[in-house]
Image (cartoon, rainbow, N blue to C red):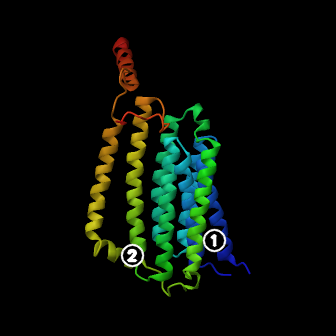
Amino acid sequence: MTVTLSDYLVVSALLFGVGIYGLMTKRNAMRLVFSVEILVNAANINFIAFNRYLWAPAVGQTAVLFSIALAAAEAAVILAIVVVAYRVHDDVDVSELKNLKG
Amino acid sequence: MVDATDAAFIGLTVVTIAGAISALEAKEIIYGAVGLAASFFGVASLFFLLDSPFVAVFQITVYVGAVAVLVLFTVMLVREGRWFGDSMGPAASFAALLTVAALVFSLVTSFFAAGLSAAPEQATAPSFLGIGQLLTGHYAPVFEVLALVLAASVLGALTLAKVDRPGKSDPMAKADAADQKEVTGGA
C-alpha cells in the first residue's frame, strides 16, 4: 500500500467536514474562528496534494503561501472584533450580538 | 504491507482530525485552542510528507507560531465559565452531523470515481527555486497587494481594539493614575 492522491483528499474532506460541523452548531465566536481556520487548512491540503501529484510547477505551493498569509491577517481582524464584542457586550455568544440587526 | 510513510500518514491524519475535533468539542475552550494548534501541526507535517518543506515551515511559523498564540491570548482575555454549553441543542447537532456526513460521503465518492488514486507522483517535487521565481516573477503584483492587505488588517485590528467600553473607565488609566499618586505622595 502506498499513499495516493485520494488519501490526502479524503483527509482534507474529513477536516472540511469537521469545520462545517463547527460552523453549523457552535454559537461561541471563538469556536467559529476555530472552524474557519480548520476549513482554510483543509483547502490548503488540497492545493499541496494536487501540486505534488498532478502538476510539476510550484503554483499550488505559492497559492498556499498567499492563503496562509491571508488567513493570518483575517485571524488578526476577527480576534480584534471578538475582543471588542466582549468589552462592549460582556459576551461572545453570536446569537446575542444583535447590535447591527436592522 | 504498511511501511514508514504509511504509518506516518495514518498517525498524522489521526493527530490532525482529532485535534480539529477537540478544538470544537473540548469542554474548556483553552484546551480547544491547544487542540487547534496540534491540528495545525499535523497539517504542517502532512505538507512535509508531500515534499513541500518550505510551505510546511511557513505553516508552522505562521499558524502554530502566530495564529495559535494569538488565539490562546484572546481565549484567556475573554474566557468565561458559562461557555460550557455553547452549542445548539442536540437536534441541531444531529442535523449538522447528517449534513456533514452526506457532504463528506459525496466528496469522497467523487474523488474515487474520478480515478485520482491512479495518478502517479510527479518525478520531481516543486522546488524552492520554483516558488521564488513565481513569487518574484508572475505573482509579484499579488505579493505586493498581499503586503498592503496585511498592513491594512493590522491597522484595522489595532483601531478596532482601541474602542472603550461605554460607561466604564479604562482600568489601565486608573492604574496609571494610582501609580502617579504614589510617586508624587512619596516625593
| Total count of labels | 2
Residue identifier under label 2: A59
Q: Where does the image place residue A41, in percent across and percent down from the top left?
A: 50, 61
| Left or right: B104 in relation to B69 | right
Q: Nearer the viewer, residue B57 or B21?
A: B21
How dense is the environment of label 2, judged by Cα within 10 Å: few (below 14), some, or many (20 and up)?
Answer: some
Which amino acid type is marked by label 2? Val
Quarter of the image where the C terminus of chain B is located: top left
Residue B109: mark = none
Q: Is residue B65 visible?
A: yes
Q: Nearer the viewer, residue B163 or B184?
A: B163
Q: Where does the image place residue A84, in percent across and percent down from the top left?
A: 39, 35
Q: Where does the image place residue A76, in percent across and percent down from the top left?
A: 40, 48
Helix or strand or loop: what does disc 1 sit on? helix
Q: Where does the image place residue B29, in percent across and percent down from the top left?
A: 58, 42
Q: Residue at x 57, y 53 (%)?
A: A21
Which amino acid type is marked by label 1? Phe
Q: Residue at x 41, y 46 (%)?
A: A78
| Left or right: A32 in relation to B175 | right
Q: Chain of mark 2?
A: A
Q: Residue B146 appears in which quarter of the rendering? A: bottom left
Q: Is residue B184 above or below residue B17?
A: above
Q: Is residue B34 above or below residue A63?
A: above
- Going by the picture, which residue comes out furthest to the top? B185
Residue identifier under label 1: B9
Spatial distance from mark 1 to mark 2, Cα to Cα? 24 Å
